[in-house]
Every structure is written in C-alpha cells, then in structure tokens.
Image (cartoon, rainbow, N blue to C red):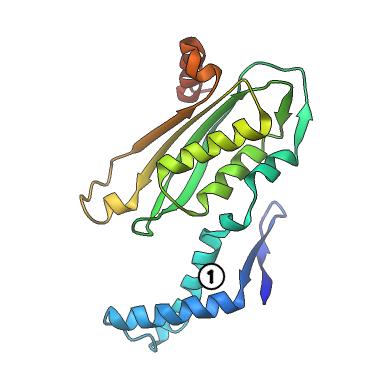
C-alpha cells in the first residue's frame, strides 16, 4: 500500500510529501536488520530499532526517479516562442547515488539550450535533473541522459550540459581524496559544431553576476 507522508510545512508554504510503498519498505528493512547483525551491531538496541525502516524509506526516496518521466516533465511546460538565443540555467544542485558502491555523489549541473521554436518553463530543467539523478547512477550517464532528454523533447538547435561533482566513493573509501572534483560534459548541435557558441556557454557558467 502506498502512502503520502506529510513532512511538515516550510516557511514558504511548501509541504514536502514522501511517497512510499509500505510492502517494499518492510522488505528492504528486513534485509537491513540482517545487514546490521552481520556488521556486528545489535539491531534491537534503542538507537537502531527504527534504523532499518528509516534506511528503507531513505532509499526509496533517493531512487524515486525511476517512477518519473523526464520527457513528460518538459512537455508539461513547453511554449511556442520566437526566441533563438542561448538559455542557460546554471548551478543546479545535484544529489545522486553511485551505482557501484551506493554512496552519494553531489555537485552542480550547468545546462543550456538554443530554442528552435519552443522554450520550456525554467523550473522544469532542474526537475529533469532530479528525475535522472534520483536513480542509481554514474555521472557520465547522468550527463548524457539530461542532454538527450532536452534534445529529443524540445528539438532545440543545441544542448550543452556540464556537471561538476564530488564522489563519496572516492572521499570516504578507496583512494580517499576529499578535494577531488569530477567534471563531465555533453553537447549537441550548435554547441558541438560551433566553437564560439561552446566558448560562450563555458564563459557564462563561470562568470559571476556580482
């Protein structure tokens, strides 16, 4: 049974709703009780009693992008407009989970497109970033998925995506390099064929308005 859980009202009136499937929560929680035992912990002690359920809910939220249709998100706010200059949305916060170790990676996405008869509501671009990021991911695929969704849905003259992220699988384990940043990029159309257009995009995402 799926439930909508109200998490309280914020200052701006936004109410966060977490949707989850109770049967899946219990199934995942059962496995996490076993995992805690295998790690040498006591899942029955006070501090861990509700941890398996909390982890199960967290994982379902962190992967809810599987239930979203990014192309439909864009289509819900497409408008005909005679505008053919670059549209840039930068510094979009990104939070995702590495599929190799199921540890977070996070950072920023910078996205641009050049309209070809249609524009899209600006809030929809961060929404499709979230829709793809809330899945088990690798940064390279995430970058391409965002690019392809915008290109295939809007059919613009070009799309550019640059993503800069820190990966906890590198910072907390393995090589343990806390300050390393991974940058990925993906381009279509004019951004691929025209060096000046690509350079303008890169200049805009690094420029400050201050």
| Residue ranking furthest to the right | 80
Residue 191 horizontal/vertical position (percent): 51, 19
Q: Residues within 10 Å of mark 1 (few under 14, many from 20)?
A: many
Say if 128 sits above or below 201 in the image.
below
Q: Residue 182 vs residue 25: left or right?
A: left
Residue that protrudes farthest toward the left in the picture: 175
Residue 90 is drawn in which quadrant?
Answer: top right
The answer to which quarter of the image holds residue 157 is: top right
In this view, 190 is above or below 111: above
Q: Is residue 119 left or right of residue 130?
A: right
Tell me where residue 100 appears, x and y as whole percent.
35, 56
Q: Is residue 168 visible?
A: yes
Q: Quadrant of the N terminus?
A: bottom right
Location of residue 17 in the rendering, given as x and y in whole percent from the top left corner? 66, 63
Residue identified by numbered label 1: 57
Q: Is residue 83 above or below residue 147?
A: above
Q: Nearer the viewer, residue 3 or 149?
A: 149
47 on left or right of 115: left
**Residue in view at x 46 percent, y 12 percent:** 195
Residue at x-position 55% and y-position 17%:
190
| Extreme residue toward the bottom, this view | 44
Task: From the top left corner, tell me how far across and down residue 40 is, in percent.
Answer: 26, 82
* Residue 163 falls in image quadrant: top left
Residue 210 showing in the rendered view: no
């Amino acid at each position: 049974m799926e439930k909508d859980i109200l998490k309280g009202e914020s200052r701006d009136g936004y109410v966060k709703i977490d949707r989850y499937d109770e049967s899946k929560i219990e199934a995942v929680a059962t496995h996490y009780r076993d995992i805690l035992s295998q790690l040498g912990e006591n899942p029955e002690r006070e501090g861990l009693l509700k941890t398996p359920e909390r982890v199960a809910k967290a994982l379902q939220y962190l992967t809810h992008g599987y239930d979203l249709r990014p192309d439909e998100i864009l289509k819900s706010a497409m408008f005909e407009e005679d505008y053919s200059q670059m549209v840039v949305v930068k510094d979009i916060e990104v939070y995702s989970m590495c599929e190799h170790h199921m540890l977070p990676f996070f950072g920023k996405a910078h996205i641009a497109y050049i309209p070809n008869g249609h524009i899209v509501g600006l809030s929809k671009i961060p929404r499709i970033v979230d829709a793809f990021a809330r899945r088990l991911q690798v940064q390279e695929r995430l970058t391409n998925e965002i690019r392809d969704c915008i290109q295939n849905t809007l059919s613009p003259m070009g799309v550019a995506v640059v993503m800069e992220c820190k990966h906890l699988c590198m910072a907390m384990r393995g090589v343990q390099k806390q300050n390393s940043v991974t940058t990925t990029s993906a381009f279509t159309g004019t951004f691929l064929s025209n060096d000046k257009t690509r350079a303008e995009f890169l200049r805009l995402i690094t420029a400050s308005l201050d």
